[in-house]
Image (cartoon, rainbow, N blue to C red):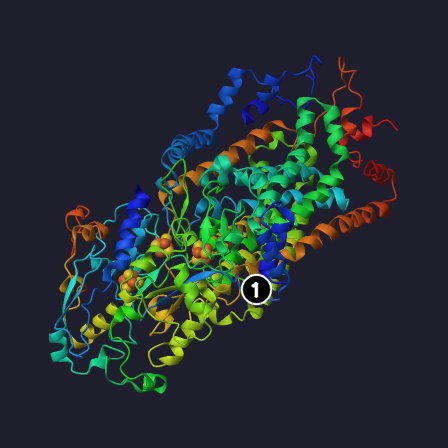
């Protein structure tokens, strides 16, 4: 029973940020909004306001390694990938896998001698590292619930909210 | 007791009542030949018994409390200080103080220094009881004492130094039980068993040296598992075992001096004339041995300090504390001992022996408890832990005294020409020490 | 002979049984001059530059192992202000928490550094080598696990652990035991899954993989970002190497690490003593018997002859 519960919870955390981005049109128009929610268990999904972020930061390469139709921007990447044109999908989940640490995936990464990028973060890591670091740098909101509401299961996980131990305060911030 | 002696009472010191020649019963032997009423009287008269009673009245319930509520209820239950007084004092101090058994065993049995014979039994008993009570301390300290035999039987951690300590202490305890059992068999009246053990004396003594050398050193080595936790001044990966082995030598010798001093002061009625007469010269001899060990210890300490280049630490607060320990516990004793030996001042030797023991206690406690986690925080043993430790220590004293009162440790078992005792194959007096011509009775009775 | 070989050697000679694989690896390491760790060992690289102190890992560990409810919720960050023993110690692992995250306000950098702490799963664990009932096992996956069934409760392992990681249920009278992170060995590692804390960390501050690979990854991260990292992989060499390793942007001592640890296994410290054991066992009996005979022989009296006869028996 306990094991099952644990399995469910962990499975859910893992896939928490599995992206379900809408299919992109070939017209190279960025989406206005992306819903990141495929396994929103501890936290609700995020309605990512893509348009807002495009307005704030016009340089796509700040967030994306590449776009559909343009060249790879960063010099470092261009050294190898300049020929690739815009053929890559900009969708994070194409390279950043949801479960980076399964035995199978670790082996895959290690056993391919021609693979150059081996230290690729998983999807959840990619999101948080990208989003949160920028939010911290730019003074944008940084608390977890600023982007996604905590669910009931999330509260149980953190022993918070109505699951808080008596006497403890919950939903604290780093301040 | 002294009162009875004054009245002309003579405690049991032979198998048979010298008056009518009948064999003492076990009960009579236990009561030293007094009637139960008299025995109780003397118990009550001695204020020390009241002192013990008070300690046990407080301490024994605390021990029970510990077993009911777990270790956490009496210790500070710190994860950074897993060991407290039980091991810091009970194991790390009791064991070196009990090195006396193998030291005197070697001197008398192997090197044939029969001058020390009168004190040999005391030294052996001191060793046995010290180890035994170290194990008692261990039983209090272990989380699951009923699993004490696990390292022997269930699961072997063969590469662990503690494994070696465990096995050696267990084996050595057995050796010591055998050694002391000679006196016991004499007392209980099984001369055959006694003779049988006596034949193994040399073997037991050699076993004692081997085991002692190894586990005294091993206790020090235990701490090399915790470099960085033990302050560098008390730590040395290479020399730790030599420090501990060497200090156990003077500790054991000084313990014999100290115990014999107390014995002489408080229970001279139980000591044979031979013991009392020779005690002063023996004490001087022991002091010579101890000061040699002290000097060696000081030298290797200095070598160790140079080797690890620890001089800079001496200027810190820890350094002062360390110098105090070395000064009070090593350097001062060396000076006092050499002065006292030259002037044959036995009183000063006795004082110095106590001082040295204090120095050793300080050293062990410093290493295991006080300087432990020196760069973290310091923690003092809580009250209940201290109470238990004191209680067990006085339990040790009580048992010690109980045995000294009875077994032929301080006195020689007298051979009364046995009227009914024809069946005893060997004359009593021949067994305790055939090597010893000056034995009072040996001269008279030994058939040659 | 390196420490591991002695241990393994003793183990393989003294303790009967054991799988063929274990025997093989033992002979292998016995032949090796320097202990290089277990080839298959997994590990975790903790990148302090990524950690945001969200304590999700603590919560995940707590739920994974069904540990007692915390005193404060896992999203209560006031715990970072907790100090003990007159401010000399921050939170540490306890019998209720296999892992804790602490905050360090460092001089070197404006923003605080957070450090997750748990058993390091040493390659040559001091807890294991100091245990006299062999309660610990270093599995081939790299986890250092503990068996409460044989533990006697002497707490030697707690003394020996260079990181003071093992905690103990002092309050249990009948079955006290050591409590520490087990690398999620039973539930996850053996099933090809990463530890719960690794999986839960939103920042991927914890990277799970083969230790061997992680060492390379760590150096690669430093190489490709030399300004960001201190050029040291904590745990690569410390006490002979640990399965959990750390990268930091501030000097490690400022993030609460003990930077004075030796770079060879703790077990090595007992070598100089263990070296004399066979010597004492072999030489002492002959030596002292010799002394004895000399002492006796010199006198040449009757008793000494008695004595000599006695040994003859
Ligand atoms: S960190 Fe401590 S408890 Fe963990 S494996 Fe190393 S020595 Fe053992
Ligand atoms: S590896 Fe497992 S047991 Fe260890 S801290 Fe992480 S979740 Fe807890
Ligand atoms: S979950 Fe990750 S980011 Fe959060 S405190 Fe733990 S290690 Fe740091």
- Residue placed furthest toward the front: A26
Q: Give x and y (percent) for residue A7.
A: 31, 49
Where C224 falls versus B118 (above or below)? below
Quarter holding the N terminus of chain B? Answer: top right
Q: Give x and y (percent) for residue C305.
A: 87, 39
Is residue C2 shown to the viewer in this render? yes
Give the quadrant of residue C250.
bottom left
- At label 1, counting other C-alpha atoms closer than 10 Å, the crowd grade (few under 14, some 14-19, many 20 or more) is many
Residue bearing the label numbered 1: C35
Q: Is residue A84 left or right of residue A24?
A: right
Where B211 falls versus C101 (above or below)? above
Q: Give x and y (percent) for residue C202.
A: 26, 63
Q: Nearer the viewer, residue A88 or B407?
A: A88
- Give the chain of mark 1: C
Quarter holding the C terminus of chain B? Answer: top right
Q: Nearer the viewer, residue C48 or B319?
A: C48
At a point 76% along the width and 45% down the height, the residue shown is B110
Q: Is residue C179 left or right of residue B211?
A: left
Q: Is residue A72 left or right of residue B324?
A: left
Q: How many marks?
A: 1
Q: Nearer the viewer, residue B22 or C195?
A: C195
Q: Give x and y (percent) for residue B108.
A: 73, 43
At a point 48% along the width and 28% down the height, the residue shown is B46
Q: Quadrant of ligand 2?
A: bottom left
Is residue B359 shown to the viewer in this render? no
At a point 61% along the width and 59% down the height, the residue shown is C5
Q: Is residue C83 left or right of residue C136?
A: left
Identify the element where label 1 is drawn: loop
Asked if the beta carbon under badge 1 is closer than 8 A to the nearest atom of ligand 1, the reply is no
Where C25 falls versus C306 (above or below)? below
């Amino acid at each position: 029973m306990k094991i099952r519960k644990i399995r469910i919870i962990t499975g859910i955390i893992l896939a928490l940020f599995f992206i379900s981005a809408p299919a992109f049109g070939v017209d190279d128009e960025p989406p206005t909004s992306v819903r990141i929610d495929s396994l929103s268990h501890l936290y609700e999904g995020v309605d990512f306001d893509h348009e807002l972020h495009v307005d704030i930061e016009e340089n796509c390469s700040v967030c994306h390694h590449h776009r559909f139709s343009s060249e790879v921007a960063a010099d470092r990447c261009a050294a190898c990938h300049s020929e690739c044109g815009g053929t890559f999908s900009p969708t994070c989940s194409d390279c950043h896998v949801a479960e980076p640490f399964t035995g199978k995936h670790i082996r895959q990464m290690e056993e391919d001698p021609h693979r150059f990028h081996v230290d690729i973060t998983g999807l959840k890591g990619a999101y948080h590292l990208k989003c949160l670091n920028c939010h911290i740098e730019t003074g944008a909101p940084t608390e977890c619930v600023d982007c996604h509401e905590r669910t009931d299961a999330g509260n149980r996980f953190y022993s918070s909210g109505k699951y808080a131990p008596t006497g403890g305060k919950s939903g604290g911030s780093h301040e | 007791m002294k009162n009875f002696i004054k009245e002309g009472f003579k405690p049991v010191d032979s198998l048979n009542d010298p008056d009518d020649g009948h064999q003492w019963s076990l009960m009579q032997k236990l009561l030293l030949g007094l009637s139960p009423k008299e025995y109780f009287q003397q118990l009550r008269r001695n204020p020390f018994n009241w002192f013990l009673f008070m300690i046990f009245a407080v301490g024994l319930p605390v021990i029970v409390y510990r077993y009911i509520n777990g270790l956490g209820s009496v210790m500070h239950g710190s994860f950074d200080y897993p060991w407290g007084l039980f091991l810091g004092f009970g194991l790390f101090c009791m064991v070196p103080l009990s090195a006396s058994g193998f030291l005197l065993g070697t001197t008398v049995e192997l090197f044939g220094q029969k001058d020390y014979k009168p004190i040999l039994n005391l030294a052996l008993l001191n060793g046995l009881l010290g180890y035994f009570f170290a194990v008692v301390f261990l039983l209090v300290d272990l989380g699951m004492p009923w699993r004490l035999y696990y390292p022997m039987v269930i699961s072997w951690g063969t590469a662990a130094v503690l494994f070696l300590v465990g096995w050696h202490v267990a084996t050595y305890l057995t050796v010591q039980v055998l050694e002391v059992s000679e006196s016991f068999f004499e007392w209980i009246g099984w001369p055959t068993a006694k003779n049988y053990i006596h034949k193994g004396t040399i073997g037991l003594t050699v076993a004692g040296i081997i085991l002692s050398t190894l586990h005294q050193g091993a206790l020090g080595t235990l701490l090399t598992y915790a470099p960085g936790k033990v302050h560098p001044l008390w730590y040395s990966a290479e020399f730790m075992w030599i420090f501990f082995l060497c200090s156990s030598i003077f500790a054991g010798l000084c313990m014999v001096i100290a115990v014999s001093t107390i014995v002489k002061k408080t229970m001279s009625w139980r000591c044979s004339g031979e013991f009392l007469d020779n005690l002063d010269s023996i004490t001087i001899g022991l002091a010579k041995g101890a000061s040699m060990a002290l000097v060696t210890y000081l030298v290797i300490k200095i070598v160790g300090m140079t080797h690890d280049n620890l001089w800079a630490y001496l200027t810190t607060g820890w350094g002062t504390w360390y110098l105090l320990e070395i000064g009070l516990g090593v350097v001062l004793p060396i000076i006092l001992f050499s002065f006292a030996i030259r002037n044959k001042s036995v009183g000063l030797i006795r004082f110095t022996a106590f001082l040295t023991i204090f120095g050793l206690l300080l050293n062990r406690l410093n290493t295991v408890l006080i300087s432990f986690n020196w760069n973290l925080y310091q923690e003092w043993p809580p009250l209940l832990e201290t109470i238990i430790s004191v209680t067990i220590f006085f339990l040790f004293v009580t048992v010690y005294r109980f045995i000294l009162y009875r077994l032929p440790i301080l006195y020689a078992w007298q051979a009364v020409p046995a009227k009914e005792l024809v069946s005893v194959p060997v004359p009593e007096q021949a067994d305790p020490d055939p090597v010893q011509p000056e034995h009072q009775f040996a001269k008279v009775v030994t058939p040659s | 002979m390196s420490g591991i070989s002695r241990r393994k050697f003793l183990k393989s000679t003294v303790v009967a049984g054991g799988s063929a694989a274990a025997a093989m690896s033992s002979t292998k390491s016995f032949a090796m001059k320097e202990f290089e760790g277990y080839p298959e060992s997994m590990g975790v690289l903790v990148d302090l530059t990524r950690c945001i102190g969200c304590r999700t890992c603590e919560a995940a560990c707590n739920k994974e192992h069904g540990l007692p409810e915390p005193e404060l919720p896992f999203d209560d960050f006031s715990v970072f202000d907790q100090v003990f023993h007159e401010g000399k110690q921050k939170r540490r692992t306890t019998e209720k928490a296999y892992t804790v995250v602490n905050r360090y306000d460092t001089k070197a950098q404006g923003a605080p550094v957070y450090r997750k702490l748990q058993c390091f799963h040493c390659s040559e664990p001091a807890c294991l080598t100091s245990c006299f009932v062999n309660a610990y096992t270093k599995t081939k996956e790299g986890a250092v696990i503990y068996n409460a069934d044989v533990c006697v409760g002497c707490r030697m392992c707690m003394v020996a652990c260079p990181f003071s990681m093992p905690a103990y249920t002092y309050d249990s009278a009948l079955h006290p035991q050591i409590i520490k992170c087990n690398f999620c060995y039973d539930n996850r590692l053996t099933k090809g899954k990463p530890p719960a804390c690794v999986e839960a960390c939103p920042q991927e501050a914890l990277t799970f993989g083969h230790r061997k690979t992680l060492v390379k990854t760590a150096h690669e991260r430093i190489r490709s970002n030399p300004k960001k990292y201190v050029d040291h992989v904590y745990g690569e060499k410390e006490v002979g190497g640990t399965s959990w390793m750390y990268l930091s942007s501030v000097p490690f001592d400022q993030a609460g690490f003990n930077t004075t640890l030796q770079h060879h296994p703790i077990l090595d410290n007992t070598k100089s003593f263990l070296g004399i054991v066979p010597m004492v066992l072999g030489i002492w009996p002959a030596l002292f018997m010799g002394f004895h005979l000399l002492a006796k022989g010199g006198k040449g009296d009757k008793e000494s002859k008695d004595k000599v006869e006695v040994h003859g028996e």
